[in-house]
């Protein structure tokens, strides 16, 4: 375990060091991140010219969801898609062979090797907006709600990671996998709004497909209008999804015959 | 380059570009998926209208018709050339393009045209299904509207390409041209009809949008297609769009001449 954490540290440090050589880029992208956060917050305000609540969410409450969407989107671009993108190349060029012979767990190497530095601060920026939304909603914060929120936020990260691993397993089997990254993006993009903002049957589907777990449930917990049962269900779902995705990944490797040499 | 030569060159460029597009069909499908965003906005509008009633003058059917058309317009007219340029400048690919006997402008234009033609071929069957399944997707089809919309879509394509190319030229001086174009596009998306139909925006923004270049790229062709514009508004829309297209074409040309003098090839 410690060895893996150390490896992760090395991966991240090297990514940051490379990026810091291009400081103007780094600053430019940080400015752009703040801009898109403001863009997302201003964009949803148009609805409130015609109504006080979208699917039961006031504007400040909706900002919590938009902030969490930004967090999830940033997590996706920083940690998940840089690795998922390389999957096609791994399988097609046989680079996967070289990863498999290393004395490190294959799933670890394939899913956590690369970091997208441009979006490294997006998760934090998103949390800032969620905080602003919470403050503006006037609902205050209690330690219990804070803890529930952190637990559900954690399960959201884990679920998104599990989904990525499952897509990677699919990539090994399909070989052609350009569209898989878009599937991940689509799931995250849909979590831009709380599931109640969509109408049945779409909103029901989104609870089953884990979109609701990404932003709606953590936001509800933070605002104190969540369902307490979720605190048991969500971690169980996340754990189950991770185990299933890992199994699927291992099975897909068994069907992989190598492409190098 | 003499006119007939340019036509011959275009035939070759278009054929080559189209072949590239058809070789990487997967890429086309991916760019189609970026159409999810307007459909999400539409879904939320439908929830809002179900709970609070439709905004005056913009009913549920209008919302559906608007966003479906806007999603298609975005596919056909948005330009990714700022990023292509950025990559070409950094990798030194621009040097290779400069060596060819056709101005890079035409090379990029031909590749963008081929991309949209392939995309349209891919979109057409999807749209046919949508039109059958969703009865709200209906537009008043008169000869005037069909011709007008076709011209407006062409103008939208040309203007967004010229804007992207002008911003791409900033790449000769800084590595931030892609980011700058993102900012420009992002700010403009409030006035273009991308974030919401301009009819649903605050009056001051609507008034401003008429004079800005952004509405030409999405809102104007869609409103025209929906039959929401009278003769005067249509003429004004074309006039404003054409004026901006000329302005950006000049800006591109000036920046291109100056930038090229600064250009020191990377790589090679």
Image (spheres, coloured by chain):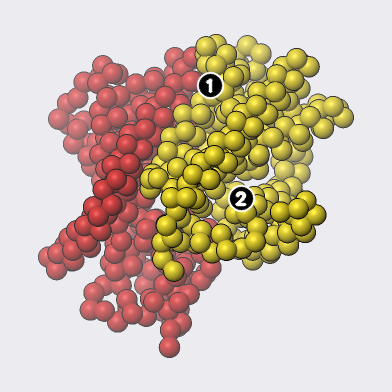
**Which residue is found at the position 39% from the left and 19% from the top?**
A58
**Which residue matches tag 2?**
B105
In the rendered image of this protein, which colour is used for chain A? red
**Which residue is found at the position 22% from the left and 61% from the top?**
A14
Q: Residue furthest bottom?
A: A261
Q: Secondary structure at mark 2?
A: helix
In this rendering, the label closer to the viewer, 2 or 1? 2
**Which residue is found at the position 71% from the left and 25% from the top?**
B238
Q: Is residue B119 left or right of residue A87?
A: right
Q: Nearer the viewer, residue A198 or A258?
A: A258
Give the Cα distance between marks 2 and 1: 45 Å
Quadrant occupied by the N terminus of chain A: bottom left
Q: Is residue B43 left or right of residue A80?
A: right
**Which residue is found at the position 49% from the left and 44% from the top?**
B258
Decide: is A20 above or below B50: below
Q: Is residue A184 visible?
A: no
Q: Nearer the viewer, residue A21 or A92?
A: A21
**Which residue matches tag 1?**
B48
x, y percent for residue A32: 36, 38
Circle 2 packing at 10 Å, graded few (<14), some (14-19), many (20+), is some
Q: Is residue B39 left or right of residue B117?
A: left
Please tell me in which quadrant of the rendered image residue A99 appears: bottom left
Q: Is residue A30 visible?
A: yes
Please tell me in which quadrant of the rendered image residue B21 appears: bottom right
The chain to which mark 1 is attached is B
Circle 1 packing at 10 Å, graded few (<14), some (14-19), many (20+), is many
Q: Which chain is yellow?
A: B
Q: Residue furthest right?
A: B143
x, y percent for residue B250: 59, 35
């Amino acid at each position: 375990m410690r060895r893996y954490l150390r490896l992760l540290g090395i991966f991240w440090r090297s990514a940051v060091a490379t990026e810091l050589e291009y400081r103007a880029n780094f600053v430019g992208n940080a400015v752009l991140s703040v801009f898109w956060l403001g863009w997302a917050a201003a964009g949803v305000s148009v609805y409130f010219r015609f109504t006080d609540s979208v699917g039961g969410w006031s504007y400040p409450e909706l900002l919590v969801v938009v902030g969490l969407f930004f967090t999830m989107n940033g997590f996706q671009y920083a940690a998940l898609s840089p690795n998922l993108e390389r999957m096609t190349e791994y399988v097609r060029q046989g680079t996967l062979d070289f990863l498999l012979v290393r004395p490190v767990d294959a799933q670890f190497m394939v899913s956590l090797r690369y970091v997208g530095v441009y979006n490294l601060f997006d998760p934090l920026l998103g949390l800032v907006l969620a905080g602003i939304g919470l403050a503006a909603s006037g609902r205050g914060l209690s330690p219990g709600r804070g803890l529930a929120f952190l637990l559900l936020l954690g399960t959201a990260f884990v679920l998104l990671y599990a989904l990525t691993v499952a897509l990677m397993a699919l990539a090994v089997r399909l070989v052609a996998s350009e569209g898989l990254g878009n599937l991940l993006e689509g799931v995250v993009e849909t979590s831009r709004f709380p599931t109640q903002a969509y109408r049945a049957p779409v909103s029901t589907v989104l609870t089953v497909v884990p979109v609701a777990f990404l932003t709606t449930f953590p936001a509800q917990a933070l605002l104190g209008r969540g369902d307490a049962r979720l605190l048991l269900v969500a971690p169980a779902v996340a754990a189950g999804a991770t185990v299933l995705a890992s199994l699927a990944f291992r099975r897909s490797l068994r069907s992989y015959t190598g492409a190098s040499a | 380059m003499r006119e007939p030569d340019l036509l011959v060159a275009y035939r070759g460029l278009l054929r080559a570009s189209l072949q590239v597009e058809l070789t990487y069909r997967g890429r086309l499908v991916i760019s189609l998926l970026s159409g999810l965003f307007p459909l999400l906005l539409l879904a939320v509008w439908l929830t809002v209208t179900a709970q609070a009633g439709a905004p005056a003058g913009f009913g549920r059917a209008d919302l559906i018709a608007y966003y479906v058309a806007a999603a298609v317009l975005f596919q056909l007219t948005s330009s990714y050339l700022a990023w292509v340029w950025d990559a070409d400048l950094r990798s030194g690919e621009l040097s290779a393009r400069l060596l060819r006997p056709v101005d890079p402008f035409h090379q990029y234009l031909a590749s963008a045209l081929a991309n949209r033609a392939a995309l349209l071929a891919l979109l057409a069957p999807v749209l046919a299904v949508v039109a059958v399944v969703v009865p709200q997707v209906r537009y008043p089809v008169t000869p005037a509207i069909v011709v007008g919309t076709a011209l407006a879509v062409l103008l939208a394509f040309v203007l967004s390409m010229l804007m992207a190319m002008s911003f791409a030229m900033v790449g000769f001086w800084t590595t931030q041209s892609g980011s700058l174009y993102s900012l420009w596009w992002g700010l403009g998306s409030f006035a273009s009809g991308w974030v919401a139909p301009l009819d649903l925006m605050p009056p001051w923004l609507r008034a401003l949008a008429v004079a800005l270049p952004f509405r030409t790229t999405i809102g104007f062709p869609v409103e025209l297609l929906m039959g929401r514009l009278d003769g005067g508004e249509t003429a004004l829309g074309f006039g404003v769009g054409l004026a901006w297209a000329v302005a950006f074409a000049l800006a591109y040309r000036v920046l291109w001449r100056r930038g090229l003098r600064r250009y020191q090839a990377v790589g090679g």
